[in-house]
Image (spheres, rainbow, N blue to C red):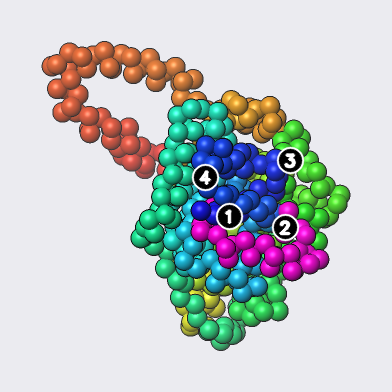
Amino acid sequence: MKIVVLNGSPKNDLSITLQYIKYIQKVLPRHTIDIINVCRMINDIKNDRSIFSGEMEKVRGCDGILWSSPVYYFLIPAQYKRFIELIWEEDKDGLFRGKYAASLTTSVHFYDHAAHNYLRAISDDLGMRYVGSFSADMYSLLKESEREKLISFAEDYFEAIERRRITTRSFYPLLRHDYRYTSSSTVETVDTADKKIVMVTDVTANDGNLAMMIQFIKDTYSGNMEIVDLNKMNFAEGCIGCLSCGFDNRCIFEGADIFNSVFDTKLKNADIIIYAGSIRDRFLSSQWKLFFDRSFFTNHIPSLAGKQMGFVISGPLHQLSNLREILEAYSECMHSHAVDFVTDEDGDPAVIDALLRNLASRLIKYAQNRYIKPFTFLSIGGRKILRDEIWGRLRFIFQADHRFYKKHRMYDYPQKDFTSRFRNIMMITLTKIPPIKRMFVRRIREEMVRPHRKIVDGYFATRRY
């Protein structure tokens, strides 16, 4: 059978992800696998759209599509995202309908599930039959047990095509509305209290609702709000995964465009950042993905720590839990505070006005109080993955991360807590004695809550007026 691999790595033939595909080719040679280096094609079709149509003819004649990509910034690379947008823009979505799909990614398992959710949703939107996913570690191919898993995954995919297996659908069509938002109330200004506010947006002439919501925010703030227009950024290129920034946080494209300068001088110096964008397929636009990918020159350092963040979105965000999770995770991993998400979904202009006004006011209030809400698994779990990777096998590549993590005591391994280690040894030993174990079982809940009660009961004694 004929399989088309859509390789989404900007490294093209030097892609680690592509080596997994080539291994499948070697082990299962009876299938024809045609590889399209999507990111290389994206650069070429800027000048010649016919190149896209030519490559899509390979899709027409294939039996299955394998989405192949590294995980870049919670998702797939911006170039790959742009390719997916072009499928609909060039009316090629019909070529994918009924084809069998699967996805394969490589990463350190940092939000790989979000990338697979996106690719599965895109497959469902294209009317494809999605078989499954394979999320590989960067070095899984070096282990025999992982190679066996890879071949099992590939064999199952090929078998599904041969037997025309029925597959389940996880993501149903988005319900979009044609509602046109226009403010229905008099704008009540909010004092900016000398806080520096920056709005990042990719708004275009076609984004009527987003433009109106942006204007409402601008009119609400009594002071100046600086606009960073991603459409005027003139990106020299998307992130190409060269990792040269890992040594000193300097991007290879520094000086080739203004992105690094804008990020350093405007976003890092802001007190409040508002992200305003419209839904494109199951994410924001590929222009937004360029923004996120290129900001990776700061690597895994929370370079926007302490910022208040607001999100103004046009489109069905409430139907896109994966996107919502990505944006919340982005904020948390930056050690910042996602204050709220406001969309145009309600359909009532008075409600949207009130939500936008509340967002503007709360951003200022939290900036004054320097409030950052407690982090959740979205960042705490991710931070532990990055901590272990940067301490271990990725330290040589991400030397700037290592210096930052060491300086800020982010290598917080529990093995260093000698008090807990000693206490655990003593308590575990004691619970080997049945009567003492029974005593602990009876008292464990009370003992767990006791130090907290001490704080609560002592509130008035320590209260400061």
Between circles 4 and 3, the one closer to the viewer is 4
Q: Which residue is mark 3?
A: 242
Between circles 2 and 4, the one closer to the viewer is 4
| Callout 3: SS | loop
Q: Amino acid at mark 3?
A: Cys
Q: Residue at x 81, y 55 (%)?
A: 236
Which badge, 2 or 4, is on the more N-terminal residue? 4
Which badge, 1 or 2, is on the more N-terminal residue? 1
Q: Which mark is residue 30?
A: 4
Q: Residue at x 51, y 57 (%)?
A: 64
Depth check: give the residue in front, 41 or 295.
41
Which badge, 3 or 1, is on the more N-terminal residue? 1
Q: Which residue is mark 2?
A: 41
Residue 373: horizontal and vertical position, in percent? 50, 50
Q: How far is disc 4 from disc 3 in space, using C-alphas?
A: 34 Å
Residue 231: horizontal and vertical position, in percent? 75, 66
Q: Which residue is mark 1?
A: 4
Q: Amino acid at mark 1?
A: Val
Q: How far is disc 2 from disc 4 in space, using C-alphas?
A: 27 Å
Instruction: State the image quarter where residue 428 is shown.
Output: top left
Instruction: State the image quarter where residue 187 is shown.
Output: bottom right
Q: Residue furthest right?
A: 255
Between circles 3 and 1, the one closer to the viewer is 1
Query: Badge 2, how many Cα within 10 Å: few under 14, some, many 20+?
Result: some
